[in-house]
Image: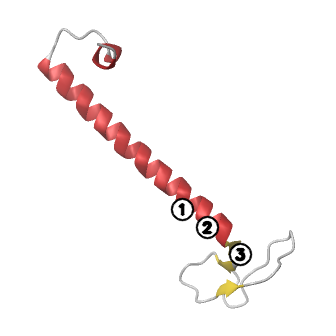
Amino acid sequence: MYSCKNFNCSNSGFDGWMSSKKQNCELCGHEMISDHEIHLKELEIERQQRNSYYKAVIEEKLGRELRENESIDTWKDIFFR
């Protein structure tokens, strides 16, 4: 299944074989994209969001630990004690 890369376009659902050369949307001229490519992009966005969340949690934990215990030498001390 292929859809227009322009998400404002109503041309979605081209079901068929597409040659290796990318085809353009008949309605707006944007490139067509496969459902598989869309799924991969969605997974990448989810991964980036998860990484941002974990980074924020770790930074918050590090900050709290450093405020509570000023004798910590490095961030490794927090995780390996």
Labelled pair 1, 2 in contact (Cβ < 8 Å): yes
Q: Which mark is residue 6?
A: none
Is 11 drawn above or below residue 66 in the view shown?
below
How many marks on residues? 3
Position of 71 compared to 40: left or right?
Answer: left
Name which residue lies at 53% across and 83% down: 8
Q: CA distance from mark 3 to mark 1?
A: 18 Å
Is residue 50 placed above or below 63 in the rendered structure? below
Q: Residue furthest left?
A: 68
Rendering quarter of residue 73: top left
Q: Quadrant of residue 59?
A: top left
Asked whether 36 or 48 is in front, the reply is: 36
Looking at the rendered image, the quarter that the C terminus falls into is top left
Which numbered marker is on residue 38?
2
Q: Earlier in the sequence, mark 2 or mark 3?
A: 3
How many other residues sit within 10 Å of disc 2, few (<14), some (14-19) or many (≥20)? some
- What residue would you read off at disc 3? 31
**SS of the residue at dot 1?**
helix
Q: Amino acid at mark 3?
A: Glu
Name the residue rendered at 31%, 33% in the picture: 58
Amino acid on which disc 2 is placed: Ile
Which amino acid does the dot numbered 1 rest on? Glu
Quarter of the figure with the N terminus: bottom right
Residue denoted by label 1: 42
How much space separates mark 2 and mark 3, taking CA atoms? 13 Å
Looking at the rendered image, the disc whose residue lies closer to the viewer, 3 or 1, is: 1
Callout 2 secondary element: helix
Residue 11 coordinates in the image, percent (x, y): 64, 88
